[in-house]
Image (tube, rainbow, N blue to C red):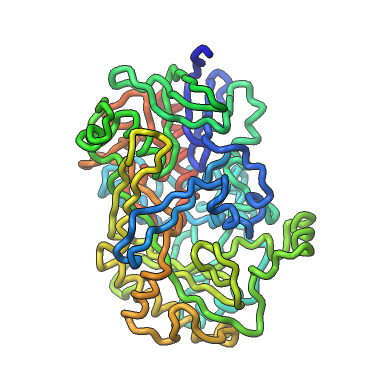
Amino acid sequence: MADENFDYIVIGSGSAGGVVATRLTEDPQVSVLLLEAGPDDDDEMIKMPLGFSTLFKTKWDWNYETTPQKHLAGRRAYWPRMKALGGCSSMNAMIYIRGNHADYDEWRDVYGATGWGFDDVLPYFTKSEGNTRLADRFHGTDGPLNVEDRTYVHPLSAAFLESGVAAGLKRTDDFNGAEQEGIGAYQLTTKKGRRWSVADAFIRPALDRPNLTVRTEAFVTKILLDGNRATGVAYRRHGQSLVARAEAEVVLSGGAINSPQLLMLSGIGPGAHLRDMGIDVAVESSGVGQNLQDHPVSGIISHTKGTTDVAEMLGIGNLLRWRATGKGPLSSNVADTGAFFASRDDLPLPDIQLHVAPTGFVDNGMHEPVRRAQTTAVTLVNVQSKGHLKLRSADPTWAPEIEPGYFDDRADLEAMIAGFRRAYDILRTGPVAAYIDGPWIPATSDPTDDQIIEAIGAYGQTLYHPVATCAMGTVEGSVVDPELKVHGVEGLRVADASVMPRVPRGNTNAPTIMIGEKCADLIKESA
């Protein structure tokens, strides 16, 4: 088949890529090809909030694993990543959190990401947001991304929230407003109790535009370069090897794993490593795949009494109710309540986030609970440890080597221990205490530090927030500049979580959508 030509090619239809392609095609004179390695997002478990973990280790999942982790008892951590239209916004837990204001000021001030301070990015958050309750300078109400309050409240979640207030945390009804710290219910990227992904919010409403071409099951194997200019992509689809050319730019939105992998497969990355893999070095870029950061999570799982477990509610009655009304327990995203606080009194900003679930969420929810339980997941959101990502082969179908370096910096472990202690204080206080029937993990209600460390080693995992492997900035090791252009390459930008120079204090889906919004404007301005 003859090569096809477009103005722009966007690789990846996820939380940033889907936004970039949609926003660019608002101009009818611009043609865009959006390539997605996975299929259409046509599974009911994608739409059902409670069903997200049923997608893990299925055809919908890239199904990555890390290297064995020293501080996770030598285990490999499983990293689910969605392979379908909408990317990880079609698999995530739908929590709408932006991070702390100071996170973006740090991007600007420490890493040289000019134009990415909080005041700079807030308009892009509000542009995409269609909040059904909040309407002030921090929130948008008419954007395509529906953000709403949960439609189902489990008694355990309500009790934990009241206990957190009784234990000294400030009640909040908006983690994305003037202040982040406090305890409250998360708002979700759902619409009337159903997942509202980037595919729903951005891509599908634009599918009838003649200037937008969307190809699913299109696996990009290489970015094509003419000298130091990106000119197109090679990809495989339905058994054919195809080439598409970009007259203006290529935008890489593969995420924190696939974006650095594809750059390196294309000859852009650390020279010595590429040569070891038998790949010709087109552009030396030492930071590609480096600086990997993720939010590690572990937690307290308690047996409960006098209440239910949301995992037992997957019956036909609740399914029919959810299908008809979008309400009931199947509209739960599992971790619907949470908190942000500092692990030490001398910290100016939160470094711990709680995700509270009315079930025993063990091993990514892969095991059906045998007893009713409640999970208080302690998540480290100000991470000091860093890792890396490397190729294991020049074959693009090989998964890369993922080394997150969990807890390599002892400060991360100390913060987690303090987070556990604060969580235990809440569980012993107020109305939630009446529901607690005894310890499960750790196996005591008053663990020593060593017992907490042992529990973290046995049950710690990812919170699904890898970032920074194509870090933005002007400091040494930066891969893209503040306009998201790859250093040393013309006509190529990266727009996804990989460009975050430091992981923000909170769930990363909303910031990734913001990056897509800002990238589209940067491209329009330069055009």
Answer yes or no: is residue 357 visible: yes
Residue plotted at (43% across, 24% down): 233
**Numbered label tally:** 0
Answer yes or no: is residue 184 visible: no
Q: Nearer the viewer, residue 83 or 97?
A: 83
Q: Is residue 156 left or right of residue 382?
A: right
Residue plotted at (66% across, 84% down): 306
Q: Is residue 191 left or right of residue 138?
A: right
Q: Position of residue 349 (x, y in %)?
A: 35, 65
Residue plotted at (49% across, 64% down): 363
Residue 151's place in the image compared with 120, above or below, is: below
Residue 45's place in the image compared with 301, above or below, is: above
Q: Position of residue 252 (x, y in %)?
A: 42, 33
Q: Position of residue 19 (x, y in %)?
A: 53, 37
Could you tell me which quadrant the C terminus lies in?
Answer: top left
Q: Is residue 286 left or right of residue 101?
A: left
Residue 181's quadrant in the figure? bottom left
Q: Nearer the viewer, residue 250 or 147?
A: 250
Residue plotted at (54% across, 26% down): 239
Residue 495's place in the image compared with 380, above or below, is: above
Q: Is residue 466 left or right of residue 202?
A: left
